[in-house]
Image: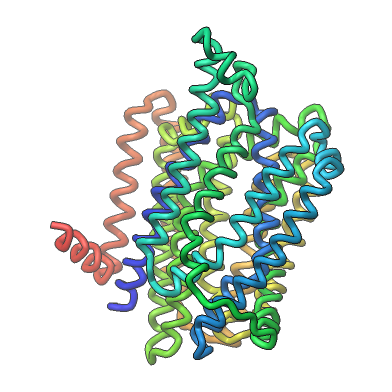
Amino acid sequence: MDSIKNLAGQTAIYGISSILGRLLNYMLVPLYSRVFLPEEAAVYVEMYAYVAFFIVILTYGMETAFFRFNEKEKNNTQVYSTTLIGIFFSTALFIGTAIALAGPIAGMLRYPTHPEYIIYFALIIGLDAFTSIPFAKLRAEKKAMRFATIKLINIGVNIGLNLFLLIFVPYAYNTFSWGPYIFGAISSGEPIIGHIFVANLAASAIVFLLLTPDFLKIRFQFNVALWKKMFRYAFPLLILGLAGVANETIDRVLLKYILPEETANYQLGIYGMVFKIAIVMSIFIQAFRYAAEPFFFAMEKEKDSRKVYADVMKYFVILMTFLFLAIMLYMNLVKYFVGENFYSGLKVVPILLYSHVFLGIFYNLSIWYKLSGQTRFGAYISIIGTSISVGLNIILIPKIGYMGSAWANFACYAVMMVISYILGQKYYKVHYDMLRIFIYMGLSAGLWYISVLFAQHLMPNETNMQMAFNTILLIIFIIVIFVSEPRLKLMVKNIGSKRN
């Protein structure tokens, strides 16, 4: 229980930067969905889908390899230095190539008049990939506060520049006589989608500067033999990562190229923005992964490690199903996260939320192949998931548009979760409390379904009554959890008493 408390504490600190930080960052989505039309927002959605791919390629599994070898090797400084130097050279090669070919690449993406997009993103991706290793070192050293501080500075700069460029600059341009003279070189009086990318680049550059002392104060040495061992361990994780990011973002790429050109950007913009409503789920998963990955490796040495892994899974599912239920029961409020032009896409939200539940469970289950060193299985599972995702997107998008992408996402993660559980029980058996896990998942889905029936048939036009009824349903879920999990109730009570 103490180990789980420590993990919860680390997750909470990382959550300050991930949950609070990314929530603040994603509060820009209401801005974007109100100042840009769906067709314009599609540019933002598509370009950040490509970012996710290339970040995985440029880090090529070395974050996890760093944690693994940082625990195994005696010379931790050499592990860090070798990893950092390897990432630096591959990143520099990528940035140089992308800038040199910016024009042709922009043409291939149907943005022939905007090669600057490619330059912006080459620098953003390169900086973020390189700084991922200093961030990993902070996580390994349990310097969660420094990690969180730098992440929050990144978020603050990004948000500040977005507000300045998308709101203040157009306002000043159109309101004051000096506006066109001061901002004429960067504005025409309307928000410009490219300014989102400029803000991101500036924020990434500041993070690089803040982390510079962390990698300049070490003695640089590159151990070729060590790097080869790390790469052999990491390469399957690269395949896993590519497959994973494909599962997460391939739908946004395929929507643009499968749908008719006259409607593709409109549907892509709606789907991409509504997808952001699942942000609470993905933020928590990210915060959990930051804390859990080094925790799981360190915990492996303990006698009761597998019991701890099982408890972590159960409590994780409880929180994820609670988040699903809370979002869906209060959708009348949550929908204001996006602009009215995007409301037609809200029907995909429950599908996407539950696919995130499956994804989170898969990440919990992934400890078996990481701890046993059989990372190739992670790659195999993710490739299967990618095949399902791509196949279903190709089949379903022409028939039902972005709804097909949502169902493909759901099926992909469900299959990956099941396969990982079956293989994990064979190669690294952990006695998960599957009965309770299924009960909690079924309970959350069942209570939401009851809410839908109540809203449709008993109180179709009474929003206040619906909200009151949904609150009762959420309280029922909480009561069931605390009655079934007295240890969890005690943990929550202890956290509350410490705060007081």
Q: Nearer the viewer, residue 162 or 46?
A: 162
Q: Position of residue 458 (x, y in %)?
A: 40, 31
Q: Position of residue 58 (x, y in %)?
A: 68, 63
Q: Quadrant of residue 12?
A: bottom left
Q: Quadrant of residue 111?
A: top right
Q: Residue at x 63, y 25 (%)?
A: 186
Query: Can residue 258 be seen here?
Result: no
Indicate the quadrant containing the C terminus: top left, top right, bottom left or bottom right: bottom left
Q: Position of residue 110 (x, y in %)?
A: 82, 36
Residue 401 vertical position relative to residue 122 in the rendered view, above or below: above
Q: How many marks?
A: 0
Query: Can residue 326 be seen here?
Result: yes
Q: Nearer the viewer, residue 405 or 279?
A: 279
With 461 as the anchor, is 384 left or right in this view? Answer: right
Q: Residue at x 29, y 49 (%)?
A: 475
Q: Residue at x 63, y 40 (%)?
A: 272
Colour option used: rainbow
Residue 107 vertical position relative to residue 130 in the rendered view, above or below: above
Q: Nearer the viewer, residue 381 or 34?
A: 34
Indicate the quadrant containing the N terminus: top left, top right, bottom left or bottom right: bottom left
Q: Position of residue 413 (x, y in %)?
A: 62, 61
Q: Residue at x 69, y 46 (%)?
A: 405
With 391 as the anchor, is 66 left or right in this view? Answer: left
Q: Residue furthest top?
A: 177
